[in-house]
Amino acid sequence: MIVHFIARDGTVSSVTASPGDRLLDVAQADNQSLEGTCEGQLACATCHVIVDAADFPKLQPASEDEEDMLDLAHNATRTSRLACQIRLTDTLDGLIVRIPA
């Protein structure tokens, strides 16, 4: 499956991932600028990404804890998510994700 990252400078990077991979891990392996300081423990928002509006409905809904962390994210939008909380599935092939400024 393919995931497309749009970096802060607008550069697009398309990477191969596998179902079950965590989006944060895929992004970090591609050297995207996502910290993931809490390592997926829902204690920060340093892996905040903006999911393309067309792809957003394909995601599992965010948990209440994730929503609380997104409230702290800088430049959050209605399609914001934490990359550590997204497990890739075949349905997400072609996912487009923007790294926020």
Image (cartoon, grey):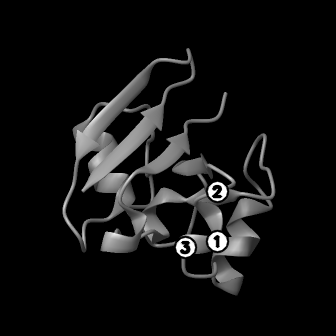
Which quarter of the figure is the N terminus placed in?
bottom left
Q: Which residue is mark 1?
A: 57
Q: Is residue 54 left or right of residue 74?
A: left
Q: Amino acid at mark 1?
A: Pro
Q: Quadrant of residue 92?
A: bottom left
Q: Amino acid at mark 2?
A: Ala
- Image coords of residue 44 (percent x, y): 59, 59
Q: Residues within 10 Å of mark 1 (few under 14, many from 20)?
A: few
Which quarter of the figure is the C terminus placed in?
top right
Between discs 3 and 2, the one toward the N terminus: 2
The residue positioned 44% from the left and 36% from the top of the image is: 5
The residue positioned 73% from the left and 73% from the top of the image is: 67
Q: Quadrant of residue 59?
A: bottom right
Q: Which residue is mark 3?
A: 59
Q: Residues within 10 Å of mark 3 (few under 14, many from 20)?
A: some
Q: Secondary structure at mark 2?
A: loop
The residue positioned 69% from the left and 66% from the top of the image is: 69
- Image coords of residue 11 (percent x, y): 46, 18
| Disc ID at residue 54 | 2
Q: Are marks 2 and 1 in contact (CB under 8 Å)?
A: yes
